[in-house]
Image (tube, grey):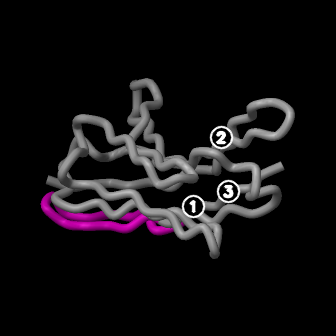
């Protein structure tokens, strides 16, 4: 089992910055990939960015050049630095991890709200 707890959401003006944090606990040794998804009202949940245990990253086209994902394996932390925020970045942001033991299991945090005002 892996537990994920997000923090750092809030209200920010367009053009501003926020940093989201995700603390992982439990069987963190089994995490292969960890990252951030978001879901805006009336829209499907979508990948924002993720990072593998080896450090390879993937970003949604809409956030490339503005968001940076990083991972501190020693502290079981993952961060999402969000710069140049836009109103369309408004969503609930979820930390998610894919763990591989005998099977592949995806875990989710409870989510944190990010609101960008115009």
The reply, left or right, for residue 26 in relation to residue 113 is right
Q: Which residue is mark 1?
A: 6
Task: Kindly state the secondary structure of the residue where label 1 is placed.
Answer: strand
Q: Which residue is mark 3?
A: 4
Q: In the rendering, at what x and y percent does residue 21 appear?
A: 50, 66
Distance between mark 3 and mark 1 Cα atoms: 7 Å
Q: Which residue is mark 2?
A: 98
Identify the residue shown where x is 68% and y is 62%.
Answer: 24
**Magenta-colored stretch includes residue 108:** no
The reply, left or right, for residue 40 in relation to residue 104 is left
Identify the residue shown where x is 42% and y is 31%.
Answer: 46
Circle 3 Cα neighbour tier, 10 Å, few/some/many (<14 / 14–19 / ≥20): many
Task: Kindly state the secondary structure of the residue where label 3 is placed.
Answer: strand
- Give the magenta part as a residue range: 7-20
* Residue extending farthest bottom: 75
Q: In the rendering, at what x and y percent does residue 27 appear?
A: 81, 56
Circle 2 Cα neighbour tier, 10 Å, few/some/many (<14 / 14–19 / ≥20): some
Task: Kindly state the secondary structure of the residue where label 2 is placed.
Answer: strand
Identify the residue shown where x is 33% and y is 41%.
Answer: 59
**Magenta-colored stretch includes residue 17:** yes
Q: In the rendering, at what x and y percent does residue 67 appear?
A: 28, 55
Circle 1 Cα neighbour tier, 10 Å, few/some/many (<14 / 14–19 / ≥20): many
Label 3 with label 1: CB-CB less than 8 Å? yes
* Residue extending farthest front: 54
């Amino acid at each position: 089992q892996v537990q994920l707890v997000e923090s750092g959401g809030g209200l920010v003006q367009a053009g501003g910055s926020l940093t989201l944090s995700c603390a992982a606990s439990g069987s963190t040794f089994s995490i292969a990939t960890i990252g951030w998804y978001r879901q805006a009202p009336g829209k499907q949940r979508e990948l924002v960015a993720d990072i593998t245990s080896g450090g390879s990253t993937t970003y949604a086209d809409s956030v490339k050049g503005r968001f940076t994902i990083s991972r501190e394996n020693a502290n079981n932390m993952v961060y999402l630095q969000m710069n140049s925020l836009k109103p369309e970045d408004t969503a609930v942001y979820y930390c998610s991890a894919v763990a591989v033991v005998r099977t592949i299991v995806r875990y989710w945090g409870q989510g944190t709200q990010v609101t960008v005002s115009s």
